[in-house]
Image (cartoon, rainbow, N blue to C red):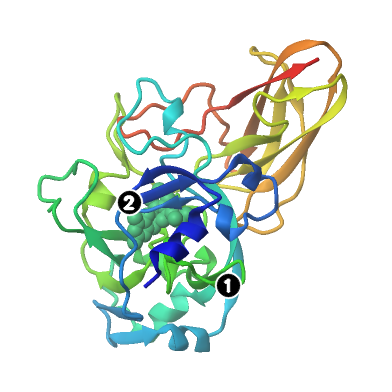
Amino acid sequence: MATAGELEAARAALLMINPAPYNAEAPPAALSGDTTPTELHYVRSNFAVPQHDGTLEIGGAVENPITLNLDDLRAMPATEVTVTLECAGNGRLDMRPLPTGEPWGDYAVSTARWTGAYLHEVLALARPIAAGVDVRFEGADHGAYHLKPILPETNKDDLSFVRALPLAHAVDPASGILIAYEMNGEPLGPDHGAPFRAIVPHWYAVASVKWLKHIDVLTEPYAGEFQTGHYMYQWPDRPEEPVSLMRVRARITDPAPGAIISPGTYTVRGKAWSGTGPVTRVEVSLTGEGDWYPAELEPARGPHQWQDWSFAWPARDIGRHTLRARATDAGGNVQPDVPPWNRLGYGNNAIEVSYVDIC
Ligand SMILES: Nc1nc2c(c(=O)[nH]1)N[C@H]1C(S)=C(S)[C@@H](COP(=O)(O)O)O[C@H]1N2
Ligand SMILES: [Mo]
């Protein structure tokens, strides 16, 4: 169990938005590199950091229930993947009317190198039965829930963090899902799910269950507070839908919002990512009404991580200027101008407006 001092040191560089449960955004500068240093990676937890006994039980509808520990996972073939994680609530503060939920600005997104065993190889050891439909992941964290539950059956005085994925996705080697025990080459820290967690590329990070304790194969679709209560898009005008893949999004990292710069050509830089990626196009607009110019887009360094882009801006005229960047992904998805409002404020991928003063 981490001591209070260790937790405090690990959290010192983040922008805290809630002390308990601890939730914090990355500082804006953390988005400029290929990866985010661990101490700058955002943290989103629904409960306090739990005790974990070091074992992972894999059971339910399987032929061979097993219990693994860290040594067992480390003895399996290790894979390292770089993955961009974004909280589904990222950008909630930009929605109007303001939705209920944690008041995330725009920095609940980060990219890290994760090392672990492939989930499909771990599941193969347990041999799911043919009738399996979902795989349920339970974290060791539990306690009184800090938000108002959506499902009437939820026990808000003692709730555990549980999420599920379709079994077909969990056992597909192409999904690249890891049971990760290292982040950026070091053992996982307490806020990021020590001793091991799921890393589910392309999905909003709610799917990447931390402090993993139980994996169970189910023969019925899973329903629960974090699956069919919260983390549902409650649209005003159409049926609700589960939060799943990250929506396409571009971010300007340089100049910083509100920067003051001198006249001359300025290389605008940023990131772009999508759960239905790769990103195929980024465009920049220097007015509010269109005239989109193509940015230089770097190919993805890997299949699950944000891409770099840049744009040579002839920043000549003194005064205030607006900058907007818009990404399109391989699925043909393009960012909307207006946040796609939903009651719980998920999946805001609207084009961001940044402004810069030239003087
Ligand atoms: N056990 C557990 N896993 C969890 C959560 C949680 O509250 N408990 N939060 C999820 C959410 S909503 C997000 S956005 C990511 C955040 O991962 P990070 O804190 O490592 O950035 O963890 C996910 N995994
Ligand atoms: Mo999240």
**Image spot of residue 174 (x, y percent):** 54, 66
Q: Is residue 358 left or right of residue 16?
A: right
As drawn, 143 above or below 77: above
User: Amino acid type of disc 2?
Assistant: Pro
- Residue pointed to by mark 2: 21
- Residue pointed to by mark 1: 186
As drawn, 293 above or below 321: below
Identify the residue shown where x is 46% and y is 26%: 94
Q: Is residue 78 left or right of residue 121?
A: right
Element marked by disc 1:
strand
Which quarter of the rendering shows the C terminus?
top right
Identify the residue shown where x is 59% and y is 54%: 111
First in residue order: circle 2 vs circle 1:
2
Figure quarter occupied by ligand 1:
bottom left
**Residue 88's quadrant in the figure?**
top left
Element marked by disc 2:
loop
As drawn, 183 above or below 350: below
- Residue 124 vs residue 98, the one in the foreground: 98
Q: Is residue 205 visible?
A: no
User: Amino acid type of disc 1?
Assistant: Glu
**Image spot of residue 13 (x, y percent):** 56, 50
Q: Is residue 23 left or right of residue 319?
A: left
